[in-house]
């Protein structure tokens, strides 16, 4: 899929995509989308652990780019507190989660029962937008545009981006050469590290997918 690009990437840039920390609705199995719920204690602790891992990365940009949704922005703040004495957070609406419209706030079994037709169309047609929501194609276009803009305008080798699983799924399917209507065969864990490398040949390559090794000892045992 062609996406209009404002500027060329002049040097290799690694973008670390990080899904926000665990939330209350994640535990309850509710669709969040453009709605929000607070981070859990586990989410808070793991966000700080993620910041400590980023702090060990050389040539990291001092700004963290983030979705403006509170669960992502709060995650970025906690990560940033571990960097440079407090990294700057820059929000970008293009990094927001896909809006799921009438699905938001509901659990998947309820959606399957009450909105079976809309769910089936959403899964089979990337251009279909659930009433009140966005299509996967719309999300992919804005996400790729944003990531390319970040890669093309930074002077750093590594940039951290805090975003959401729905958006990351669209991007990763694109990078892996999968159709948007294909079932996802990979996980997008909370606070996992997924690294994309953009280069001057206008290529985007997947380097790391969902690495959570830094979270192993983030939460104290009870």
Image: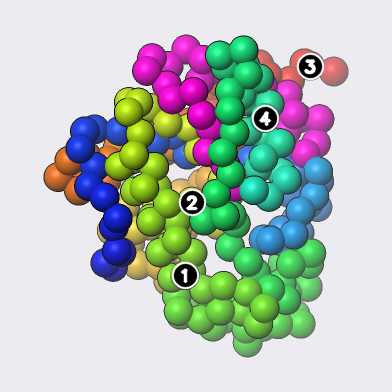
Of label 1 and label 3, which has the lower sequence position? 1
Task: Residue lying at the far right in this picture: please name it.
Answer: 222
Gap between marks 4 and 2, in whole Å? 20 Å
Relative to the observer, which residue lies in front, 81 or 211?
Answer: 81
Whether residue 25 can be seen here: yes
Which element type, helix, strand or loop, lies under badge 2?
helix
Q: Label 1, on which residue?
A: 138
Q: Residues within 10 Å of mark 4 (few under 14, many from 20)?
A: many
Which residue corresponds to mark 4?
Answer: 77
Q: Which of pointers 3 and 4 indicates the residue nearer the eye?
A: 4
Could you classify mark 3 by the number of other residues whose Cα lies within 10 Å: few (under 14), some (14-19), or many (20 or more)?
A: few
Query: Who is closer to the viewer here, 221 or 167?
Result: 167
- Position of residue 110 measured from the top left corner of the image (x, y, whole percent): 78, 73
C-alpha distance separating marks 3 and 4: 25 Å
Q: Position of residue 65 (x, y in %)?
A: 52, 38
Residue 221 circle label: 3
For the N terminus, the quadrant is: bottom left
Q: Earlier in the sequence, mark 3 or mark 2?
A: 2
For marks 3 and 4, the one nearer the N-term is: 4
Looking at the image, the residue that sits furthest to the bottom is 117
Q: Residue at x 30, y 55 (%)?
A: 6
Q: Is residue 37 magenta?
A: no
Q: Earlier in the sequence, mark 1 or mark 4?
A: 4
Q: Eyeballing the image, is 64 above or below 7?
A: above
Magenta region:
39-67
Tag 2–tag 1 contact (CB < 8 Å): no
């Amino acid at each position: 899929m062609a996406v209009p690009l404002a500027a060329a990437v002049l040097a290799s840039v690694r973008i670390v995509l990080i899904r926000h920390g665990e939330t209350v609705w994640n535990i309850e199995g509710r669709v969040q989308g453009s709605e929000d719920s607070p981070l859990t204690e586990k989410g808070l602790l793991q966000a700080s652990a993620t910041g400590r891992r980023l702090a060990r990365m050389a040539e990291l940009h001092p700004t963290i780019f983030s979705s403006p949704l509170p669960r992502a922005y709060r995650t970025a703040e906690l990560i940033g507190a571990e960097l440079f004495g407090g990294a700057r957070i820059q929000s970008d609406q293009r990094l927001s989660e896909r809006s799921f419209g009438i699905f938001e706030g509901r659990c998947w079994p309820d959606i399957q029962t009450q909105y079976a037709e809309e769910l089936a169309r959403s899964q089979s047609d990337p251009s279909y937008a659930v009433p009140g929501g966005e299509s996967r194609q719309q999300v992919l276009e804005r996400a790729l545009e944003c990531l390319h803009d970040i890669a093309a305008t930074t002077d750093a080798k590594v940039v951290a981006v805090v975003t959401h699983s729905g958006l990351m799924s669209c991007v990763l399917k694109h990078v892996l050469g999968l159709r948007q209507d294909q079932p996802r065969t990979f996980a997008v864990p909370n606070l996992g590290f997924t690294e994309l490398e953009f280069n001057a040949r206008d290529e985007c390559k997947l380097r790391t997918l969902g690495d959570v090794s830094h979270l192993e000892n983030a939460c104290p045992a009870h």
